[in-house]
Amino acid sequence: MNLVPRSGLTDLPTYADWSYWQHDTSKNQDVCWDSGTSLVARELSEYTGFSIPGFHRRVRRGELLPHTPWNQYQGSGTGSGSVGPLRAVVSGNDIDDWWTEGSYPLIDSWISSESLAARVPTGANALVQEAATRIMGESMDALTFLAELAKTKKMFLEAGESFLKKQVPRNWRQLSNNWLSYRYGWRTFMYDCKNLHKAVARLDEKRIRYSKRARSFDEWSETEKVTNTRLILGTTFSVVENVVTTYKVELVGTVNADVTVPAFSFNPAVTAWELIPYSFIVDWFVGVGTAISALSFLAAQRRYAASWGCRISAIKNVSLAGTSVKSGVTGNCESSGSGTAELVVRVPCSVPIVPQLTFKLDTRKVIDLLAMVKQRI
C-alpha cells in the first residue's frame, strides 16, 4: 500500500530586551554596561507520519487499513529573571549599585522531545498481545468451564454446609481460606456466568471485524537540586537551582482484525494452562496464558493490523536563587520558569507469540499471596 509522507513544524519564539546598569555614585548618574535580547518564551509543534490515500472512502467501504507510523511533539516554555541589586565598594566610601532591567532568564525550562522519548516505557509488546487476547476473550472458554465444574460443585457444597452450621472465620487460616474462595471461586464463577450470558446472546451474531485495546498508565515526579558557581554579567554567584518535573504516561496496544470468534471456544492448550496449580501467579509476571491466547488469535485471523502507542506529557518547574561570592560585591540574582510538553508516538508492529514480561501486581493480589502462604503454612 502506498503511503504519503506527512510532516509539519511551527516554532514561535518570544524575545525580550534587557539591559545591565550601574549607578555611578561619584558622578550621580546611571550608566548602561550591557544590553541584549533573551528568549523568554517559546512554543513548538511538529509532527511526522504517513497518510493513506482515500482513507475515509476506504473505511466506508469496510477495508481493514494498516496502522501507520506517527510522531507528534508539542512543547512550550517560559522564563524570567533578574540580577541585583548588587552593591560594590568602588573607591573610598563610594558604593555603586548594579542591576538588570527587563527579563534576564538564568534557567532552562524547556522539555525537549528527546528527553520525553528517552522515558517512553517498555512493555508495549505485552499490551499488543493483551489486545489480541481480548479479541479471543469475546468467546466463552467452555472447555475450562466444564473442566472446573467439579470444583464449582465442591465450592457450593462447602458454602451450603458453612451456612447451615452458621460457621464464621475463627482464625487467620479460616479467614484466608474464605478470602481465596471468594477471589478465585465465587468471583470467577460470577465472571463465567456473565460470559455464558454474553455467549448465548452472540449465537446468531455474524460479526467478523474486531478492535481491541489494552492500556497502562503511570505517573511520577523527578526532583533535582543543583548547587554550583556561575559567572553572570561579570559577577560570580553561588546558585541553587531546583527542578521538579512531573511525567504522565499512557501506553496502549491496539489490534484490529477480521476474525471469526465463536460464541463458545474449546482450546485444550488454554485449558491445560488454566488447570495447572498457581499458573495464574506466573501470569502476573510472565504472560504465558496471554501468549497461548495470542497464538489462537493468529491461527484464527484472516488479516489484522496492530500497533503500540504512547502519550507522554510533562510539566517542569524551575527556580534559581544565587548570592554573590565576588569579593567586595553583595547582592542576589533570581530566576524562575516553567515548561510543558507532550509526545505522541504510534509504531506499527505484529502480535508477538513469545510470552512477555508483565507486572500485574496490586494490593489485592499481594493479599492473595499472603493468604496462600498462610494456607500453605
Image (tube, rainbow, N blue to C red):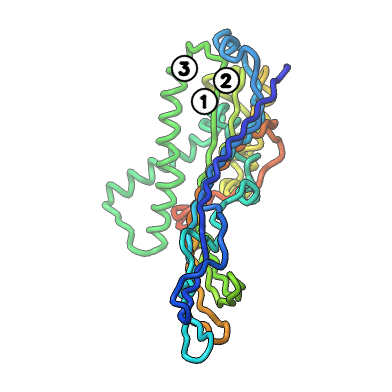
Q: Helix, strand or loop at disc 1?
A: loop
Residue 311 seen in the current view: no
Amino acid type assigned to the residue bearing label 2 in the image: Val
Q: Quadrant of residue 267?
A: top right
Q: Which residue is mark 1?
A: 138
Q: Which residue is mark 3?
A: 202
Residue found at x 50% / y 82%? 88
1 and 3 marks in contact (CB < 8 Å)? yes
Most foreground residue, 286 or 332: 332
Q: Helix, strand or loop at disc 3?
A: loop
Residue 256 seen in the current view: yes
Most foreground residue, 307 or 98: 98
**Mark 1 → mark 3, Cα distance in angstroms:** 9 Å
Q: Quadrant of residue 73?
A: top right
Q: Position of residue 287 (x, y in %)?
A: 63, 43
Q: Which residue is mark 2?
A: 261
**Disc 1 crowd, CA 10 A, few/some/many (<14, 14-19, 20+):** some
Residue found at x 47% / y 72%? 84
Mark closest to the chain's N terminus, 1 or 3: 1
